[in-house]
Amino acid sequence: MASLDKPPLGTSTVKWRFPDIHPEGRKYTLIAAAIALLSLFVWDFITWPLVFLTIGVAAFFRDPVRVTPQGEGLIVSPADGLITMVERVELPPELAGPQALGEGSMLRVSVFMSVFDVHINRTPITGTIRHVIYIAGKFMNADFDKASEENERQHIIVEDKDGQRIGFTQIAGLVARRIVSFVKAGDMVVGGQRVGLIRFGSRVDVFIPEAYGVEVALGQRAIAGETILARKGAPRATGIAQ
């Protein structure tokens, strides 16, 4: 009989696997693959470029598994990409007011997604979706500061169990032409859960409440659902207008 003095050693393993393709992108991948196949019989000289295009489309809509940090008072990145802005700004009108994030200014962290990044967006906290506000607009470079005011965008506000609200904004870019939402007001979400995507290059802004300290820096790479952007009670970063 085995001894019960010590717990048995774990035998589970985790193996790497190719990321799944999100259902939103499967039809585009199949269309690209069909065109590549058709080119074999019509324009065979462009078959290989079309094969690479098909691989690129599949890669764009890849949906890898993410492991979200557990704990109270964490705000995780809703997007993969580069931290391009960490600055205090006036709240957008759609996020201002007593039923939204309050009044005045707030620290904003911007994550820029290139066409090579994963474009599935995730909720930064666990809670209830209070507002989903879509606004039609332009399609200028999402890395421009004024893109947050003029581009097509979608604001989402999530409220945690303590009543703390976190707002984040999906912003379409120069090539992006559609913001796809997976959630609606009233939905319950778990931190790191998929809430939408933006096609072909874009940006996500996260508005950080006063009680939180930012834990990322300009130029850092963020991973959606995994990178901690801010932590409640953490020291405020130096060099940022507070």
Image (spheres, grey):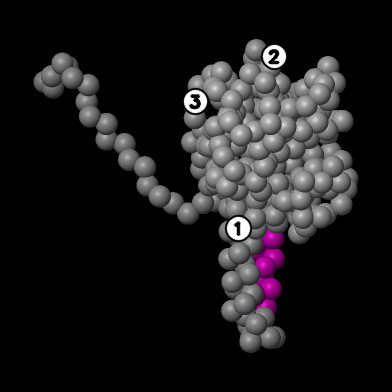
Q: Is residue 149 left or right of residue 25?
A: right
Q: Circle 2 is placed at which residue position?
A: 163
Q: Quadrant of the C terminus?
A: top right
Camera sees residue 80 = no
User: Mark 2 vs mark 3: which is more N-terminal?
Assistant: 3
x, y (%) of residue 229?
Answer: 58, 33
Question: Residue tagged by mark 1?
Answer: 116
Q: Nearer the viewer, residue 36 or 142?
A: 142
Say which amino acid is labelled 1: Phe
Along the line of sight, which residue is nearer the eye, 112 or 144?
Answer: 144
Please, what is the three-letter code of the amino acid marked with disc 3? Gln
For the record, the magenta segment spans 27-38
Q: Please give the label number shown on residue 91.
A: none
Seen at 69% across and 31% down, the residue is 241
What SS does tag 2 mark?
loop
Q: Is residue 134 magenta?
A: no
Residue that badge 3 annotates: 70
Q: Earlier in the sequence, mark 2 or mark 1?
A: 1
Residue at x 63% of width, y 87% of height: 45
* Residue 91 against residue 56 in the figure, above or below: above
Give me the C-alpha separation between circle 3 and circle 1.
28 Å
- Let me know if residue 36 is in the magenta part: yes
